[in-house]
Image (cartoon, grey):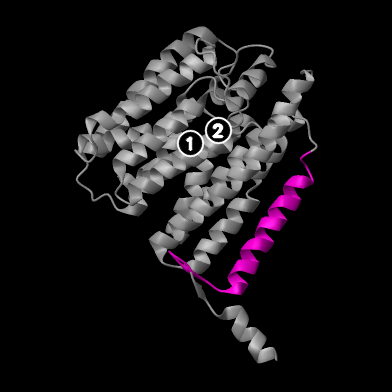
Amino acid sequence: MDKALREFLVKEIKFKRCSLAPLDILLLIGTSVAGACLRESVVSYVSMEGFTMAQTAMLNQLKLLSFLFDTFLAILVMDMVITHTGNKIKGFLAYGVMILLPVLTASSAMWGLGDQVYVFFALLAVAYLLKGKKNLGLISLGISILINSNGLFLLPVFIGLYLKKEVKTVSFLAPLFGFVGNRLLVTGILPIKIPMITADNLLKSTREKALLSYNYPNIYQIFGTEQFVEEYSQAAYWFVICLGLIMGIIIGLSKRPLTKERIVRLFVLSAIVIPYFAPFMNERSGMLADVTAVVLGFFVFKKFYIPLVQVIISYVAYSAYFRGESVMPMALVAAVSLVLIMDLIREEA
């Protein structure tokens, strides 16, 4: 009886794209239940107060949507890891890490602003690129940018691919339309209500004054977030645009082969560098870097320190909002992030 049970548990069942044993399915279900229980324990936290019943109901619904896309993200990362490494165990481990990732748990159950939606489409763009479907990747990136302009953090890598003549010019209309659409929706010129954008605007309305950085550990935490906000922000926007173009040009002119590991590493670098110098970043601006870093960690196991450090950096920013103060000097955390950036650049040297 015991032998028959063991054989049943490990006997793989062939599906369309993969084979799973009942034990594998139980593992995935157990991990998912653990993730749900973890989120249920903090879902009652109210990240913003003073809103109408309708606004509060919308935020609660966004928490459910966020958890759903947590699962989609975990499945996508698992698929990327299995496809690239051919190792099913690594893929299951990646799924578990994503489901239990502190920044995703806090984002879906405590913030509940639906950030996982734009991150999912941004990561889907990376997945399409790794499969050679570069133009579909740009379309997916355009959807991400439409929902949240933070999707632009990944654009420099696609600019580099364009200079290598690996993507079509017309495909860049998707990110362009996404950005224009996002601006029209955020400013209210387009009278269409997208819950994620509405929720983000609600959060912005709770900020007492304009700061160069809202608890995000970037360069402004070192030099000061309150001085010369208007002047620095105007210069910073142009600097970030030039920085993104320079990154794209360097990638485009580089003679090094674009392996899958290098592509993901470039996306991680871009997702960390752009918000590091961009003004008005908030506590959640590191989520795209967190997720891409996890993918890199499973692609190249010896680089797993990168997602560990990056997730800690992001969670310090989260805790600064939830606690009302940072657990450590934010300038120090920004310095650690700069070291991480230099480490990623060293890989490209």
Nearer-the-camera pick, 335 or 99: 99
The kind of secondary structure element at disc 2 is: helix
Q: For the residues marked 2 and 1, what is the alpha-carbon distance in whole angstroms?
A: 6 Å
Q: Which quadrant would the C terminus be assigned to in this image? A: top left
- From the top left corner, tell me how far across and down residue 103 is, in percent: 63, 42
Characterize the local packing of mark 1: few (<14), some (14-19) or many (20 or more) Cα atoms within 10 angstroms. some
- From the top left corner, tell me how far across and down residue 203 is, in percent: 66, 21
The residue at 34%/53% (across/down) is 260
Q: Are marks 2 and 1 in contact (CB under 8 Å)?
A: yes
Q: Amino acid at mark 1?
A: Leu
- From the top left corner, tell me how far across and down residue 128 is, in percent: 36, 46
The residue where tag 2 is placed is: 334
| Magenta part of the chain | 15-43
Q: Which disc number belongs to residue 338?
A: 1
Q: Which disc number belongs to residue 202?
A: none
Residue 11 falls inside the magenta stretch? no
Q: Vertically, is 120 above or below 301?
A: above
